[in-house]
Every structure is written in structure tokens, then in C-alpha cells.
Image: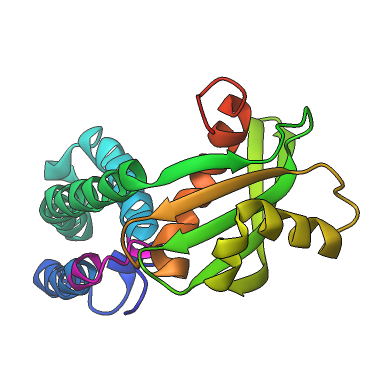
Amino acid sequence: MHRLRPGWFLEGLWDAEYQQYRLLAYLQGVYRSFLAQKLYPPLSDLIASYAELAKLAESVQQMNLSETPLALSTLEEIIEFALPRLQSAIEEGKSLYETIAQALQVHIVGIIPLYRDEGYMLLRRGAESVIRGYRYEIRHLYSPEGQQVAIRLSLVGEYPNSWLGWGLQRVREELIRQGSDLPVPLTLVVESPWVLPLEETLLPIIQRALPRWTQEASHMGFS
């Protein structure tokens, strides 16, 4: 499906009814994506568009519309139509996000090192016959706006179900052998009860949770 770009309401005809039709068509695609359990990029686009329009709404409210051009009245009409519908779609997306996030089972294989900004994550989806091994990197960035966190996940390998018979510790040892620069890595195991889309759902949710998981690893009762 197409993306909801910044300033989408300025594209095409400057007509409230036309822009409302465009938004409704886009939201139909969003709900289809959610039914297919695909959260991204629709959810992030919805949140960004809502924030953009809410900021515009504040500016419009400070104006005297009786003395402003018709174009501004059209903008106000678009905003009033769009905000509640965007909010409703966001709430549905967040509900799906929380349902999936809370269903993930997370535990640790091996020791818990002091340095946890780099390590491995083993992912298994439902009854799939493979387990995926990812290397993660967490980078703390500092800017005038404050500290930000950049998270990178890179697929290292896929291991057949027979590997599980050897135990997850054996998979961890294979990952360490392949990446000798991390001799004592934190290794998280993440299990989803469902076979969910990777790029559109599972990996974005895992990326957002990784900093918390690594910080709480030593006292969250992971085994």
C-alpha cells in the first residue's frame, strides 16, 4: 500500500471532499494491513500524520477564520475530518502492537555480561521449522534534543529445527564462533506464539523492546 507522506493533504485538488476521500481510501488499506497483522509502516505514518495535523489545528485555532481566506477554512475542514479517524486507526494499531508484544516470550541463554549493547537475538515464530539468529547493536546518540537510541538488527543465520535438539546453547556457541569479536555476548531468545510478518511487525516490536530487555536482563527473572 502507498505511504501517508507529510503534507499529504496538500497533494492533488485543494478540496475538502477530495482530501477526505483520499484519506478514507488510505485508511481502508491500513485496516487491511492490520487484519494481516502488518503494523509498519502504517502505524508510524498514522502517528506522524496525526501529530502534523494536530499542530496545524493549534495554529488554525489561533486565527480568526472570519477574516482568513477560504483556503484556510478548507484546511480546518480537512483537519476536523481527519484527526478523529487517524486517532481511531492509531488506537487499533497500538492495541494490536500491545497484544503481540505481551505475547512474546523472552529469556536468556548463557551468562549475562556487563556489556550488553551488542549481542545476539534468537527468534522463533510459532511452529516454524527454523530459528533465526540476529546480531543486535544498540547505540546511544546525544544531541541538543537529548539522548536517542539507535538499534540495528542484522540476520546472521537460520538454523533448522534439529539445532533445537542440541539446545539453544549450541546455537549460541555457533553464533559466537561466527562473530569472534563478541566472545561473551548477551544472547536473548524471543519466541512468538504466532507466525507473524518479520519486517512489518515482529522485528520493529523487538527493536523497540531491546534496550529495555538488555537493561533488565539481570533482574527480570529471565532464565
Q: Residue at x 50, y 25 (%)?
A: 221
- Per the rendered image, the range of residues in magenta is 32-42
Is 194 placed left or right of 86 in the picture? right
Is 206 placed left or right of 81 in the picture? right
Of the pair 170 and 176, the residue shown nearer to us: 170
| Location of residue 178 (image quadrant) | bottom right
Q: Residue at x 13, y 48 (%)?
A: 84
* x then y, percent, for residue 197: 38, 70
* x then y, percent, for residue 53: 29, 49
Q: How is the image coloured?
A: rainbow
Of the pair 170 and 209, the residue shown nearer to us: 170
Is 162 placed left or right of 141 in the picture? left
Residue 34 colored in magenta in the image: yes
* x then y, percent, for residue 142: 74, 33
Q: Taking 61 as reference, is 208 above or below it?
A: below
In the displayed orientation, state which residue is furthest to the front.
165
Q: Residue at x 54, y 33 (%)?
A: 223
Q: Taking 166 as reference, is 56 above or below it?
A: above
